[in-house]
Image (spheres, rainbow, N blue to C red):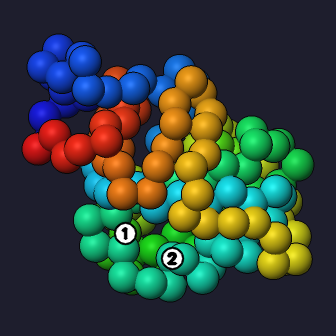
Amino acid sequence: MKSVPDFCDEYSDKIQILQFDFKNFGAVDKFSGEIVTVECPEDNSLLRRLLGDDGTGKVLVVNGGASSACAYLGDNLALLACQNNWAGILINGMVRDVDELAKMQIGIKALGAYPKKSEKRGLGEFGHDIEFGGVKFQSGAFVYSDNNGVIVSSSQLL
């Protein structure tokens, strides 16, 4: 995969650039794939369901509303994502179990870490357009991420 800056140079008219500074938590710093969206207010019930599906070539984009009240992803869900071949997870929210996440062969970006788990109330929606950081994420579009940042394109750039 080219670097995010290279994509920005070559496809400046076809991309959106995420304006937030997300931190890497997985062992893979560079990842890309087709977007699968989920919006879940301080509840990660839908994440377990989605990460249990085949994620080959896909990145789960989670809108947690930038909440710092709980973690949306920990070691158990990250392991499930690895077992089901997800390329990455981008979370507008927090993660936990960061020492374990750092050893897992998956791209994980989030705003930060928080030790408390989320509620399990079955709330949220997936497959709908979500927005954060100045970017509109649509299921079926593509996300590219490395240590330089995150970009989104409606079509595959590779």
Residue at position x 67%, y 74% from top? 46
Quadrant location, the N terminus: top left
Chain-order first, disc 2 or disc 1: 2
**Place of residue 85 in the rendered image (x, y in percent of width and height, measured from the top left):** 32, 75
Tell me: 86 left or right of 41.
Answer: left
Tell me: 49 left or right of 39.
Answer: left
Circle number at residue 62: none
Instruction: Find out whether the residues at labels 2 and 1 contact each other: C-beta distance under 8 Å.
Output: yes
Circle 1: is it few (<14), some (14-19), or many (20+) Cα within 10 Å?
A: many
Mark yes or no: residue 75 visible: no
**Helix, strand or loop for disc 1:** loop
Tell me: 34 left or right of 52.
Answer: left
Residue at the disc numbered 1: 86
Foreground residue among 27 and 78:
78
Question: Is 32 placed above or below 152 here?
Answer: below
Q: Quadrant of residue 56?
A: bottom left
| Callout 2 amino acid | Leu
Mark yes or no: residue 154 visible: yes
Residue at position x 12%, y 19% from top? 10
Quadrant location, the C terminus: top left
Residue at position x 68%, y 57% from top? 39
**Place of residue 3 in the rendered image (x, y in percent of width and height, measured from the top left):** 19, 30
Residue at the disc numbered 2: 51
Circle 2: is it few (<14), some (14-19), or many (20+) Cα within 10 Å?
A: many
**Helix, strand or loop for disc 2:** helix
**Place of residue 41 in the rendered image (x, y in percent of width and height, measured from the top left):** 82, 56
Foreground residue among 134 and 77:
134
Question: Is 85 placed above or below 60 here?
Answer: below
